[in-house]
Amino acid sequence: MQKKFSKYDNSGGHGEKDRYLITYADLITLLLGLFVILYASGQVDTEKYQELSSAFSKYFKSEPAKALNGGNGPLDGSKKAIPEPMLLPREPKSLEEVEAETEKALSSFVSQGLLSLKRTESGIVVTISESLLFNSGKAEIQANGLKAIDSLSKVLRSAKLSIAVDGHTDSTPIKTFQYESNWHLSVARALNVAYRMMRLGVPEENFVIRGFGDKRPVADNVTAEGKMQNRRVEITISQPHPDAPASQTSEEE
């Protein structure tokens, strides 16, 4: 008796020819799943991704503990890590110290005869000739005169001493647009010298500025040499008088 096979029987006939459809269907299913996964992974939450990335970076790349937190290594530098040293205020210079330093600072001018230095009962007197400081009939300080004034100012910056700057002229009358008399000229010269010293740091309260015109000569006003000696600026450095207003102001401050 002959056996009949169904068209959909897997055991033989046409059923064996259609078996590839199962493999094809499985492949299509897998591809669909793959595309779904790729699509889902493409929709990344940027903020959450950055948070996770930062967390992992900190965890796996953590810095070693610093020295102050129990770790090893050098301490971080700082301007205020070491306190600045406490310096005691420097004692003001004595008159003897000022005298010695002034002689050293002005020695080149003394050797040229442009300046003299002497010690008197009132203090140290520095006499500067007109030829070093000024042109005739003028009160503007010349370049060489500025060097001498500047050198003296460096010595007197930290000295709590009285400084009297006196201007002197000879007896030759003067009357110009700028200076009406020798009084005006002598005061202007003393003022310019003192003000230069103030600008270089010598305390203003130390100064007394005076002009004597031709009334206090040190030589005759007859000869040219005598007149030249009378045209001068004298700087007298002395101990401050206890009753002087400047001294009282300094003590109150």
Image (tube, helix red, strand yellow):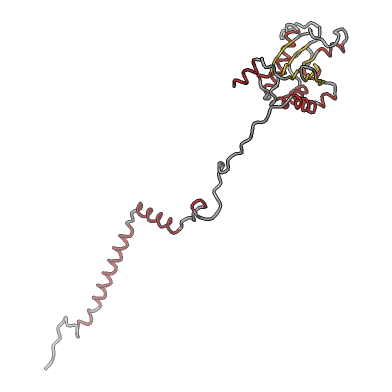
Q: Residue placed at 44% from the left, 59% from the top? A: 60
Q: Is residue 114 above or below residue 78?
A: above
Quarter of image, res 237? top right
Q: Quadrant of the N terminus?
A: bottom left
Residue 230 position within the rendered picture, expressed as x and y whole percent measured from the top left? 82, 12
Quarter of image, res 191? top right
Can residue 97 be seen here? The reply is yes
Left or right of 232 in this view: 13: left
Q: Residue placed at 23% from the left, 81% from the top? A: 17
Residue occupying the far left of the picture = 1
Residue 44 position within the rendered picture, expressed as x and y whole percent measured from the top left? 33, 56
| Foreground residue among 190 and 18 | 190
Residue 196 position within the rendered picture, expressed as x and y whole percent measured from the top left? 70, 21
Q: Is residue 224 above or below residue 149?
A: above
Residue 12 position within the rendered picture, expressed as x and y whole percent measured from the top left? 20, 85
Residue occupying the far bottom of the picture = 1
Can residue 115 be seen here? The reply is no
Left or right of 45 in this view: 203: right
Quarter of image, res 118? top right
| Foreground residue among 124 and 198 | 124
Residue occupying the far front of the picture = 242
Q: Is residue 183 above or below residue 150?
A: above
